[in-house]
Amino acid sequence: MRRKSLSQFLIEAERTGDISADLRLLIELVARACKSISHRISKGALGDALGNLQTENVQGEVQKKLDVIANEIFLDANEWGGQLAALASEEMEFIRVVPSHYPKGEYLLVFDPIDGSSNVDVNLSVGTIFSVLKAPEASPGRDIREEDFFQAGRNQVAAGYAIYGPQTILVLTLGRGVSGFTLDRHIGSFILTDATMKIPDTNREFAINASNRRYWPEPIQRYFDDCLAGSVGQLAHDYNMRWTASMVADVHRILTRGGVFLYPADSRPGMQSGKLRLLYEGAPMALLIEQAGGRTWSNGQAILDIEPESLHQRIPVVLGSTSEVQLLVEHYLHNE
Ligand code: AHM
Ligand code: MG
């Protein structure tokens, strides 16, 4: 059977009018950046990319060498192409307006270059998350501003991630379902290997960093305790637990075999709104989850309905199989 490459997939989407030519080219550039990051990661200690730097990012987190390398790869790969007006990254304090010597396009690119970067040094899965928004209509003399990125997740025209694990896989939504592409290293192309990813609704598996239990809100503690007791929502079920400390890896597992992922707000300093960032992590993952038939929750609403108030805003995150998120919301989180 002849398999379809990402390029063919995107050209077909352009021909059917699902995406513009510029969006097709932008996704091609994003995929190229992910290939390059995958290559750097796979070199490990041979590539001088492991370990920490002496610097902190805007979140006050110590930067890994790879955080900075991957951020540069993404900027270099994407800002020259002519499809973008500006970029925002988890690793950059301010937005980056496309320099004037490059042509300017109509899209905004948002990305987390290496998600779960603490996993890199111990050779576990990490990923890159990206999201594409439309820039507001240009008017003469008006520059792109930070507020132009403050759009609810439902406005995303594309979102996806690359997971760098035993295989490198690109998972993409253009707003009409979710597709998975595996990197064929011999030919250097992403090949369509899962045309319609749908989250199974049957799996009883939860993902949460259980070491934070004492800091969680009471409803989350109760849900977790009921999972361990096998009595969630008064239903008798054995639950399984997985936590990889890489959201990309945890979400990829849930997209593949179902389950629920939680990173709640907690009472630790700086965690009162949760840990994960709305623009770089919450919104793109929420679009993928909804497009694959799943559901999300954050402070009483779907993540895609949240209007961002700042670039690096954090939110509590619950996402996964529809029936499990529904059960959680109805039996535990309804007053939250
Ligand atoms: P990062 O983008 O700085 O790597 O942080 C986000 C990561 C997520 O991938 C993961 O779900 C979470 O942080 C793990 O946090 P913790 O170490 O508290 O378990
Ligand atoms: Mg991240």
Image (spheres, rainbow, N blue to C red):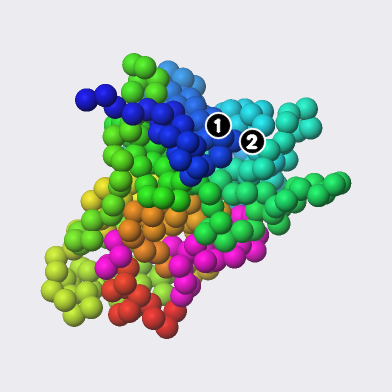
Which residue does the image show at 48% across and 56% down from the upper left? 282
**Residue 81: percent from the left, percent from the top?**
64, 29
The amino acid marked with disc number 2 is: Gln
| In the image, residue 150 above or below residue 190 | below
Task: Report which residue position mark 1 lands on.
Answer: 25
Which residue does the image show at 27% across and 67% down from the upper left? 324
- Sequence-first disc among 1 and 2: 1
**Residue 268: percent from the left, percent from the top?**
50, 66
Do the residues bearing badges 1 and 2 touch, measured as CB atoms within 8 Å? yes
- Would you say residue 80 is visible in this rendering? yes
The amino acid marked with disc number 1 is: Leu
In the picture, measured across the screen, residue 249 lies left or right of residue 69, that is left
The magenta region covers 298-324
In the picture, measured across the screen, residue 250 lies left or right of residue 14, that is left
Residue found at the far bottom of this picture: 335
Circle 1: element type: helix
Residue 319 part of the magenta segment = yes
Which residue does the image show at 37% across and 47% down from the upper left? 178
In the picture, measured across the screen, residue 198 lies left or right of residue 109, that is left
Q: Dot 2, how many residues are within 10 Å of its Cα: few (below 14), some (14-19), or many (20+)? A: many
Q: Dot 1, how many residues are within 10 Å of its Cα: few (below 14), some (14-19), or many (20+)? A: some
Considering the image in quadrants, where does the C terminus appear? bottom left
Picture quarter containing residue 186?
top left
Which residue does the image show at 86% across and 46% down from the upper left? 141
Task: Report which residue position mark 2 lands on.
Answer: 83
Circle 2: element type: loop
| In the image, residue 331 above or below residue 107 | below
- Would you say residue 209 is visible in this rendering? no
